[in-house]
Amino acid sequence: MINVLPSGQIEERTDNVGTPCAGTRLAGPGGNAASKAALATLKRQLKQQLAAVEKQQTASPDSLLPQSVGEVDDLTTKLNGALKELKIRRSELSKKPAPVAKKTAAKKTAAKTP
């Protein structure tokens, strides 16, 4: 990865940590050969990253499914836990009295009156 620092200096990195974001100055007025080379390299890297993202977006739905018995078991455990929590919540809600919609009832009565 090549980073073009705000000062115009070029920094070559082998990791993707600290890559420049919006607001980074890529070339000074008129540019120079080093800046143009850095921009060309950056453009190539961005195209590669974009291709990787597009590949992930078009991945088959099967790749999103569990791929092993262990993954299925883990997901089943999590799903059963979530169902248990929902049953508890439903029980709590059913014990509470239902809220009375006074305004709605008054509007219906007013609408019936000629």
Image (cartoon, rainbow, N blue to C red):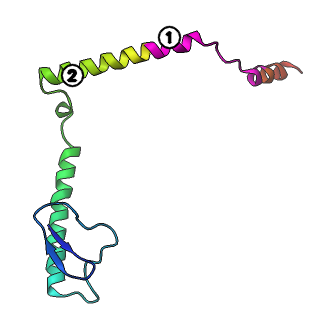
Q: Earlier in the sequence, mark 1 or mark 2?
A: 2
User: Dividing the image into 4 quarters, which one contains the N terminus?
Assistant: bottom left
Give, as a three-letter code, the residue at label 2. Answer: Asp
The Cα atoms of the two marked residues, 1 and 2, are separated by 26 Å
* Quarter of the rendering containing residue 85: top left
- Marks counted in the figure total 2
Decide whether the magenta segment is chiefly helix, strand or loop: helix
Q: Is residue 76 above or below residue 15?
A: above
Where is residue 41 drawn, in percent x and y?
Answer: 14, 71
Q: Is residue 21 above or below residue 82?
A: below
Where is residue 39 drawn, in percent x and y?
Answer: 19, 75
Q: Which residue is mark 2?
A: 74
Q: Residue at x 43, y 13 (%)?
A: 87
Where is residue 104 drawn, in percent x and y?
Answer: 74, 23
Give, as a three-letter code, the residue at label 1. Answer: Ser
Instruction: Find residue 91 and name its label.
Output: 1
- Residue 25: within the magenta? no
Q: Residue at x 13, y 79 (%)?
A: 37
Q: Which residues are magenta?
A: 88-105
Q: Residue at x 76, y 21 (%)?
A: 102
48 or 6, nearer to the observer? 6
Indicate the secondary structure of the residue bearing disc 1.
Answer: helix
Is the C-beta separation of discs 1 and 2 under 8 Å? no
* Quarter of the rendering containing residue 9: bottom left
